[in-house]
Amino acid sequence: MLLPRTEPVEISTRMRPGEWTEESLQAHIEDYRQQIRNMGATDAEIVTNVERTDEGAARVVVSWNRTGL
């Protein structure tokens, strides 16, 4: 099933404390960005948001807002 071209695309994950390092986090981010590039997004259209908790968890969201395309 294909989404309408106006629907945003988002790839996200949550990692618990001890499941990631800064290096593996950056690798996840780049992998998600590449997946969205493969769908047709330009680097300028890709938004990356990383949240780290005080407990050591991380949440990564990489999105492509296709509204208006």
Image (spheres, helix red, strand yellow):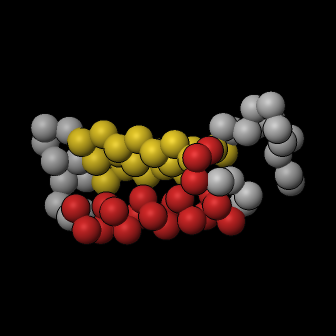
Does residue 43 lie above or below 26 as drawn?
above
Identify the image quadrant of the N terminus.
bottom right
Q: Residue at x 85, y 52 (%)?
A: 2
Q: Residue at x 72, y 60 (%)?
A: 39
Does residue 19 lie above or below 3 as drawn?
below
Q: Is 23 on the left or on the right of 37, as rendered? A: left
Q: Viewer-proximal residue, 57 or 69? A: 69
Q: Is 1 on the left or on the right of 56, as rendered? A: right
Q: Position of residue 38 (x, y in %)?
A: 68, 65
Q: Viewer-proximal residue, 57 or 41? A: 41
Q: Position of residue 53 (x, y in %)?
A: 20, 38
Q: Residue at x 51, y 48 (%)?
A: 62
Total tally of numbered discs in the picture: 0
Tell me which corner region of the image, top left, top right, bottom left or bottom right, holds residue 40.
bottom right
Identify the image quadrant of the C terminus.
top right
Q: Viewer-proximal residue, 52 or 34? A: 34
Q: Viewer-proximal residue, 58 or 49? A: 49
Q: Is 10 on the left or on the right of 39, as rendered? A: left
Q: Position of residue 67 (x, y in %)?
A: 75, 32
Give the residue furthest to the front: 44
Q: Is 65 on the left or on the right of 15, as rendered? A: right
Q: Residue at x 25, y 53 (%)?
A: 16
Does residue 57 lie above or below 6 as drawn?
below
Q: Position of residue 13 (x, y in %)?
A: 43, 51
Does residue 42 lie above or below 48 as drawn?
below
